[in-house]
Image (cartoon, coloured by chain):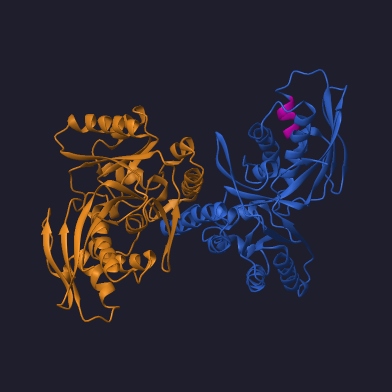
Chain colours: A blue, B orange
Amino acid sequence: MNEIKIFSPATVANVACGFDVLGFCLDSVGDEMVVRKTNKKGIHITKIEGFNLPYETELNVAGVSALAMYKTLDVDFGFEIEIYKNIKPGSGIGSSAASAVGSVYGMNELLGKPFNKTQLTEFAIKGEALASKCEHADNLAPALFGGFTLVKSVSPLQILEIPSPDDLYATIIHPQIEIKTSESRAVLPKEVALSDAIEQWANLGSLVHALHTSDYNLISNSLKDVIVEPHRSQLIPQFNEVKKAVIEAGALGAGISGSGPSIFSLSKGLETAKKVKDAMQSVYLKTVIEFDIHVSKINIDGVKII
Amino acid sequence: MNEIKIFSPATVANVACGFDVLGFCLDSVGDEMVVRKTNKKGIHITKIEGFNLPYETELNVAGVSALAMYKTLDVDFGFEIEIYKNIKPGSGIGSSAASAVGSVYGMNELLGKPFNKTQLTEFAIKGEALASKCEHADNLAPALFGGFTLVKSVSPLQILEIPSPDDLYATIIHPQIEIKTSESRAVLPKEVALSDAIEQWANLGSLVHALHTSDYNLISNSLKDVIVEPHRSQLIPQFNEVKKAVIEAGALGAGISGSGPSIFSLSKGLETAKKVKDAMQSVYLKTVIEFDIHVSKINIDGVKII
């Protein structure tokens, strides 16, 4: 096998109470990539469609993660990467993570799987760091492992796969506004009240338990973020209206996807997730803000060959 | 049935990363209580052995929780309570919780179980509040439900029962020093670094996952407290030496039990838990501090009739 086509999924990080540690994987939106073994040594990006991204390997997220793996290999061939980008950069659903994951996953398959998924995450972190200026894995882990993941620590890298109930669906709206990374970082508090931190970890502990026990009521009850959302939601127009509308439409809960501006919601069942879509749309249709919207089952496989 | 004898167990609250929310139940140490229906209305404490505690119902933890339940009843009889106290007050292994739980559990049995365990916890909270000056359930919940419990919230009261592996044992040492509640509260930070809070909730989420999956390595890896232990451990002489010694003896981890001074440790298997006991003892035998020490399987039943 010398060539492989990959679906690299979008992901939702943070998931309300799981700031910086929790994430889950989507299946209805993601990038496609072709990875090809070539006689020419090195990593070469030969095609990019969808968005305007750099072709220089060292400046491209997929290129940097590919290089991180390539440097550990002792081979007399190279790889070409074609990127068909569907996930808008800066949308808050793991666009850079999908790029970083796709190249290393594809290379690993072509090499006969010498690396496990945690090792692939280590390489992908280098690509993610190019985009987000810090090494984190909360989008990479669900993109690679699928389902819900908890990044227990980055150094050493420890990723836990949390089971989730079969009938869990996500609805995600991406209001097309730009939030600068610097801005979404600047609003984060450096210190938090101990009482708020306790509430947050009670909710995260509960959410992990609820996912293990397929307890939808408890999932709903645990999807609260008292630490970050009060600050970052102010950067997202209509955030509170969307949250109110999706709960009225039957969603289990909602929150900011990653650092925004996308808003995610979780629902029991596809029908409810579609109603939630209508509810989200109706809020933004009253504004001049354009948006994308996705309904997706939780993708338990993660990145895959297509 | 007009009379019942109860074993009301000691408990470990906080459990390193689970400050204010997590707890587990012991089976080798606990109070015994007799609860008796009487023609005389009201709640009367008729016997106290073991420690010097007040007989006045309104000043006794077991009496106050009993009264909280009794006030909701419309009955023409009353209850007598005898308390055989084995858990030293102020030891940090849920002495007041055992008292608060025993009376209401016993009354509920004699009444034909009109109340569920969450309702019993609500009554017991009133007794606990007499002792600790605040309403909390992190010792009450494991004493009533058994096993590991996560108190998701106190108002409304939400208690989650977290499964735990069969071969998990606790070793607890109680160095007989007095730490004033006011002192152990005063050292708590009001604000904590966001980065520390994230580490703490990553560990708590991991511990809940590890308990669900019987992953002893991950239990070990998650038993860390970066928020409270650095402050409160300074009030406990030899804390760091004990922690080092139990890890060398093969324990999964250790931490402060409740607000101290007791130190708990968890181990896989009884043999290791006994080695941990020796290791703990050896540290305090070099000092003038007297101590009690207990080895206990995790008690998955909680309070019970004997």
Q: Is residue A264 left or right of residue B226?
A: right
Which residues are the magenta region?
Answer: A65-70
Give the position of the N terminus of chain B as an image quadrant.
bottom left
Q: Is residue B226 left or right of residue B176?
A: right
Question: Residue placed at 63% from the left, 34% from the top?
Answer: A118
Residue B2: x and y, percent? 21, 69
Question: Residue placed at 75% from the left, 47% from the top?
Answer: A9
Residue B61: x and y, percent? 21, 64
Name the residue at the front extreme: B1
Is residue B94 at all visible to an observer of this figure? no
- State which quadrant residue A280 falls in: bottom right
Q: Main secondary structure of the magenta part?
A: helix
Residue nearer the viewer, B288 or B59: B59
Q: Is residue B190 left or right of residue A254?
A: left
Q: Is A24 part of what is drawn in magenta?
A: no
Residue A19: x and y, percent? 56, 52
Residue nearer the viewer, A93 or A289: A93
